[in-house]
Amino acid sequence: MSKSSLRVLAVLLTAGIIAVLFAGLDGLPGAIKAQIAAERKSFTVAQSQIQSAQAEVSRNLATESALFRALPSAREYPDRLGRAANSLAAAGQSLAELEQLEKQDRRSDRTRAESLLGRQKQVRAAAVADAESVRKDAAHWVDLKQHLPQEVQDMERDHKAIHAVDLAAAAAAVQKAQADWPEKQNDLESRLATARGVLTRSDELWQSTTEARRAAAANDYTKLDFGALFAAADTLKTGAADLPKQAEQLKTLSAQLYESWDKILVDMEVRGSGNARAYNQKIKTVRTKIADATGKASTAASDEKWVDVSKAQYQAMEKNLGMAIEHKPAGKYDTESERVAQPAGFAYMAPQGQSNQYGHWEQRNGTSFWVFYGQYALMRDLLFNRDYRPMDYREYQDYRTYRERNQTYYGRDTASQAPKYGTSGTATQEKYSGSTFSKSGGFKDSKYASKAGGYRDSQYSSPAAKDPNVDRSPRRFGSGSSRPAEQPRAAPPPSRSYRPAPTPYRPSAPRSPGRSFGGSRRR
């Protein structure tokens, strides 16, 4: 072959390659073609599903004509199935247009193809869902009829279960609570009326279905209103499940009004390192129960437990050691607890010049101090970590100001001008000098920090600090080292039931120790 012939052949081959490349670039993208092929298969499956639903519903309507004549919803079955079939037919037109675009294979049709695919999938799915809904509804009623004798027995069982609920006890608890806490009267009365309504409605349905239940027992379907009977059965079943819960909730809510409680952050610790780091808080829950709104008779108790928290929760609370991070007063439901951190015990004091069931203001050397009554001495000791010192009314006034603003009050030490409460507070560092947090270096800038040989003879030192044989090697906050020998404690369990509400905190300015809860607003 001559050189000229070879050159001509090369030109033709190059032109052909270029033509093929441009032809590929001008066609529909491969992904669009793949979607069209997949939709073609899905459309065929949808046709089979709707045809199957139509056939099944038609059989049920024919074989259970007495049943479906009594059901108003069944009259709509044919129309609903017809609309589903028409919708799928409309989707078929879109599929035909997609197939035409696929044959024409033009890149310029990409946007149109994508639009048709989106609409096609949506219409197809909706049509199948509508047909399937009709099929399931018809099958549900057929199944109920087949189990009709059992359904009648269940109705009798549920009616008896409703009458077995002791609403009288719940009503008595509500009546007492309404007298003691008038502000809860409307809410409790509404809940009690709802519970009584379940009982009344169940009796009405039981009486109204007497003939229907007799007809069902005799298999006399000509006199049986299936729809009304099954609806009554469902209502009785729901009432039998709900009424015991409602009665118990009434007693529980009423009891909550006679209890106050505080969740106090009394210790915290970070263990491990890196991704294995664990954050723990020790929460003391102090509960006080009263017999009536006067609070003259009361009992107090507390419990402490370590809980696992997230890093975010730990950091949100780490400035609130010794504080009540959640408080629920008497006369409120547990769901109405206050979640703005506050100095423990302050919430139980009355405004200046007043007294309440917990204590009163007492004049001493021209100054008013809050004094707790004797019956609340245990509660006082638990809240103040057994170091209660009568509170000056001026400090209480400052606390009230911050509380009205929904802010956390950290107080101020008059001698050092430092915060008095919270992790940085002088009073807290004194009361919790023996905590794990302190021994891990948490109060590193405080005189109460754990130091080898330091403050061994102090009244605030731990019992182990007075023991010369105890290992006093320094510890790092957040380390995974073992606990001091004098305070062994097993690792906290992997799952905890309580999670304290986080309270964001920002450091206090020297002249303004209190900060806004969750914000940066200053006093």
Image (tube, grey):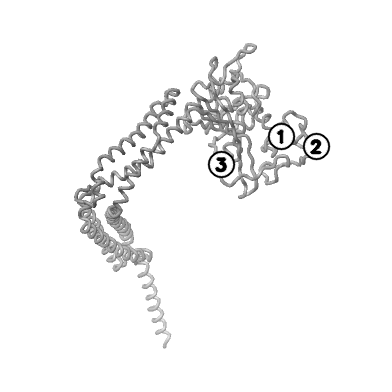
Mark 2 or mark 1, which is nearer the start of the sequence?
1
Mark 2 or mark 3, which is nearer the start of the sequence?
3
Name the foreground residue: 276 vs 363: 363
Label 2: few (<14), some (14–19) or many (≥20) C-alpha neighbours in 10 Å: few
Determine which residue is flagged by label 2: 468
Mark 1 or mark 3, which is nearer the start of the sequence?
3
Label 3: few (<14), some (14–19) or many (≥20) C-alpha neighbours in 10 Å: few
Quadrant, the N terminus: bottom left
Name the foreground residue: 378 vs 93: 378
- The kind of residue on which mark 3 rests is Ala
Name the element at disc 3: helix
Name the element at disc 2: loop
In the picture, residue 393 is in which quadrant?
A: top right
- The kind of residue on which mark 1 rests is Ala
Q: How far apart in space, not on screen, are marks 3 and 1 (Cα)?
A: 25 Å
Q: Where is residue 366 in the image (x, y as percent from the top left)?
A: 62, 11
Q: Which mark is residue 449?
A: 1
Determine which residue is flagged by label 3: 312
Residue at left 69%, top 38%? 441
Examine the rendering and report whether any part of residue 331 can be seen.
yes
Asked if the residue under mark 1 is in contact with the one under mark 3, i.e. CB atoms within 8 Å, the reply is no
Q: Where is residue 96 in the image (x, y as percent from the top left)?
A: 26, 64
Name the element at disc 1: loop
In the picture, residue 199 is in which quadrant?
A: top left
Name the foreground residue: 511 vs 332: 332
Residue 513 against residue 134 in the figure, above or below: above
Examine the rendering and report whether any part of residue 126 can be seen.
no
Quadrant, the C terminus: top right
